[in-house]
Every structure is written in C-alpha cells, then in structure tokens.
Image (cartoon, rainbow, N blue to C red):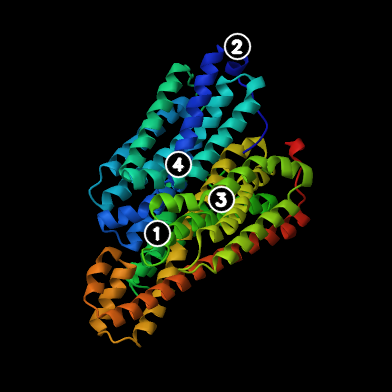
Amino acid sequence: MSHSVSVSASASVKQPAWESWCILLSMCVAVFTIGLMSTGVIDAMVKMRDQLNLSPTTLQWLMNAYLLTAASFVIISGRISEIYGRRNLFVAGVIIFVVGLVIAACASDGAWVIVGRAVQGGGAAILAPGTMAILKLKLPPARQAFAVTTWSASAGLGFSFGPIIGGALTDGLSWRYLFWLAALLLVVSLILLFIGRAKNKPAQGLQHIDWLGTVLLILFTLPFFLGLVQGNAWGWSNPWVWGLLLFGVIFFFILLVVELAKKAPLVMFELFSNHQFALGAIGMIFNGFTLLTILYFTSLYLQVPFLQNFSPVMAGVALLPFSIGFFVASISASFVTNKFGFRLPLLTSGLLQFGGFLWLCFITSQTTYLFLWAPYFLVGLGCGFNMATFPVLAMMSVDDEHANKASGFVNMTNYLGATLSPAIGTIFFVGLSTSIFYDLLKHIPVSDAQAHRIASALFGHPDQMKHLFQALVPHTRAEVLFAMKHSAIVGNMSVMIISAAVGLIMAFLPLLVLSVVPAKSNADH
C-alpha cells in the first residue's frame, strides 16, 4: 500500500478526540481479529480433527476455505467499497464474518466448520480494505502516522500471537471458544465504530465493477486448488483430479486474455511488466508459503502423540519465538529499509528463513523444547520482515491511479501463497511418509490388511490408532511405532526442505531484479 497520506475533507474538520480514539480502537480490534483467525485456528486443528473425525484433506480445508475465499474477494472488495462507502462495506464484512464464526462454533461436523471458515474468509476480505481508509477519513492528519503504526502493530499482534491464544482456549476450554471470542471482538469493533460516528463516503461518479473478471478468478482458483488438495485423498491417477487442475489452468489463461484486453481490469496483469512490482507480488506468494509452513505443519507435528505429544497450548507456546521474531521484524522493517535499502535486508531475511527451515529438518522424536526456539526465531524474523517489505516494494512502483487495485492484487498473492503451503506440503508429507511406512512394514510381521488399516489410521484418522495397537503383540507394536516415527519425521523433513529452498529463492531473487530496476527510497513515496 502507498505510504502517502491523502487527507479528505472530513479529516480536515476538527473532530472530538474521543471519536477519533473510538474509531482507531475499532479498526485495531478488527484487524487484530483478522490476524487471530488467520493463525489461531491452527493449534486447535488437532482437537478438531479428533473430535470431528477429520481426515488430513479435510483438515487442510479448514485453512484453505478461509484463504481461498479471502483471495477471491479481496481484490473486488476495494472497488465495491468505493461505490457503497467504506463504512457500509466494513459493517457488511463484520456481519458476514460473525455469521461464519457462529457457524463454525456451532458446527457438528467438519463440513459445517469448513462452510464457516469459507464465510469468515469472505468477511475478512470485505472488511479489511476499509479499515485503513476509515482511519484516514476520520482522523486528522497529525494523528494519521500514529494511527497507521498502531493499526499495523494490532494486525501483527493478532497474527503473531494467534497460535498461543488459540492453543490456550482449545486446551483450557474448547476450540469453539476461539470462534466465540472472535465474534465478540468483532461486535465490540462494530459498537466502537458507531460510537465514533464514522461517516460513509462513497466515491463520486460512475464506478465500474469487473464481474466477469471476478467470476473467471473464482473459476481459476477454486477448481485448481480443489484438485491440488484432493489429490492425495482421491489418488493422483483419478481423472477428476487432473480434470479439475486442467479446468483451473484453462480458466487462468482465459482470465489472463480477458483482463489484458480490458481498459479497467480487475486483475492488472500488465503490472508484472514492472520488475519491481513483480518481485513484490512473487515475494508475497513465497512468503505466504513459508509462513503457513511454519504455522501449519510444525503445529500439527508437535502435537503428534508418538512424537512430541505437545498439548495445543504448549504447541502455541513453542511458536512464541516465531511470534516474537515476526512482530519485531515487521514493526522495524521500515527503519531498516530506510537505512539500508531493500537488496541487502531482503537477502538477509531470505537467508534467515533458509537457515531456520534447514535447522528444523533435524527435528526428531527426541528433540527438546529449547532446540526449537532458535530456528523458530530465525524464521519469524525472516517472515515478519518480508511480510512488511514486499508489499511496500510492490506499491512503490505503482502510480496513485492504480494503487487500489494493485494493493488488492498484492494481498491476493499472499493468500494464494498461504494456500499453496498446506496443499503442496501435504502432497509431499503424506506421499513420502506413506511410501516409507509401507516399505518399513514389509519387514514387520503384520498382514496386508493390518498394514492398510494402520496406514489409513495414521494418515487419515489417528483416533483409531489406539484400538489397532492393542491388537498387536508388544514386539510388533514397538516395530510399528518405530516405522510410524521414522516415516513422519522424514515426511516433515521434506516439507522443511521445500520451504528452505523457497527461502533461498527469496534471498537471491531481489539481487537479480533490483539490480535491473533500482528501488525508490521510502522518502520518495
């Protein structure tokens, strides 16, 4: 997003201080809640899996349903807010989000939780763009710099400490209370908004919404990611999997052709001709990927009963070094880039992620809690800095006329990158772990039927493992347990290696791109 502050007429009129504080608090509570629900649900997943009998594929959809709907609607929501007004769209987004939270909190099975998460993602995409705009419309110029800093810190706090809050609520009460807490916070945000008497300011003149582009974007993302996620469950030889992937790819190219031919497209692909913008957008995809890897896979791995066997709250606390590193790096990123530019800091942050993920390749069932602190902190520093820097890098290369759409596009790339992580990571984790597990079982005296039931339980419904274990003799049980540990460790290692490679790409890509197109200084923007 552009750092230039445009002052509207409403901001220039003196407002009572208490109204400004109510608006600021309202927007900060809203973005904190978005961050909380982006990451807080991760440490609750194991309990949700056990209570609702969810498969690994269904578990992915608890994240992907949220991320995909957010990615699909975040671009168009900015344009809709210009037509109907930021406040009205913010209120609509809060209502939609709360409905999704209530659906998930009351869900009796995995399908309804997924529906609730999808609705939450749509609500987040609708309300998020209006938060900053409402602050700029309501607050006087002298307070806007403080407001932007507070707004950013609130989002970072929710995102960084979401796993700890989610784990604590899940462990102490129930995972359902996480959704109720988020609903309560959004209601408080809405009350503060009306107390602060925020005004609705629709844009003047005729505004155009690219509905065709919106439909094509959804027809690209949903089938493609459905095929990617369901590949392990349905089998990669299943024609439906490849049909969905092909369907998504076809509609991507249709979207590309249609949008390039339009004067006012929803997705501005021509921005990728600017190397600096392309770097910022691609960097957000990569960073979204590594971010979800550390939150999703390590959280699930730490809670595996036959490995670390952490409780949800302990899994959240284990991620505290990551949260601290992420928060510190994100709020100090602007100072660092002002002093050193972009190339060297981005090289450093990428190498930090590379080193952290490489370190995490050596996690075993004997790994101590303290061993995790250093690599989590390194990855947190890298992810936090990149999350704050790549959007700035992209938006610095865009003129004010296209800033709104470009900002939505950059946000969409972050969501898409985050969606790719559990999808691709699960392909390698489940695929490699299953293959190794079956190879090890060949040397253990169990029947093919027993091996199949154990593998299905291990990679599908772990709650069935206890019953299956009791049917084995002690010696065989010990050998099966070793096979389970070894296969899970190797599967987790494969995901960490992939993320380390992505971190390495993020480190050196800016050196190539920014040497061709030098970045402007922050002072110029």
How crowded pointer 2 is (Cα within 10 Å; few <14, some 14-19, many 20+) is rated as: few
Q: Left or right? Give the position of 139 relative to 164.
A: right
Residue type, label 3: Pro
Observer-side mark, 1 or 2, equals 1
Instruction: Tell me residue 461's x, y (percent).
Output: 28, 65
| Residue 221 at x, y percent in the picture | 43, 55
Q: Which residue is mark 1?
A: 303
Q: Which mark is residue 321?
A: 3
* Label 4: which secondary element: helix
Name the residue at 41% across, 49% down.
Answer: 313
Secondary structure type for disc 2: loop
Query: Which three-letter amino acid code belongs to the residue tagged 2?
Result: Lys
Real-space Cα separation, disc 4 to disc 3, in angstroms: 17 Å
Q: Residues within 10 Å of mark 1 (few under 14, many from 20)?
A: many
Write down the quadrant of residue 427 in the picture.
Answer: bottom left
What distance separates the C-alpha of mark 2 from that of mark 4?
Answer: 34 Å
Q: CA distance from mark 3 to mark 1?
A: 18 Å
Picture quadrant of residue 376: bottom right
Q: Nearer the viewer, mark 4 or mark 3?
A: 3
Label annotation for residue 131: none
What residue is shown at x 60% (from left), y 66% (from top)? 501
Q: Amino acid at mark 4?
A: Leu
- CB contact under 8 Å: marks 1 and 4: no
What count of labels does the image hold? 4
Which numbered circle lies on residue 14? 2
**In front of the other: 39 or 289:** 39
Of the two numbered discs 2 and 4 in the rendering, the one whose residue sits closer to the viewer: 4
The residue indicated by pointer 4 is: 36
Answer with mark 4 or mark 3, whichever residue precedes in sequence.
4
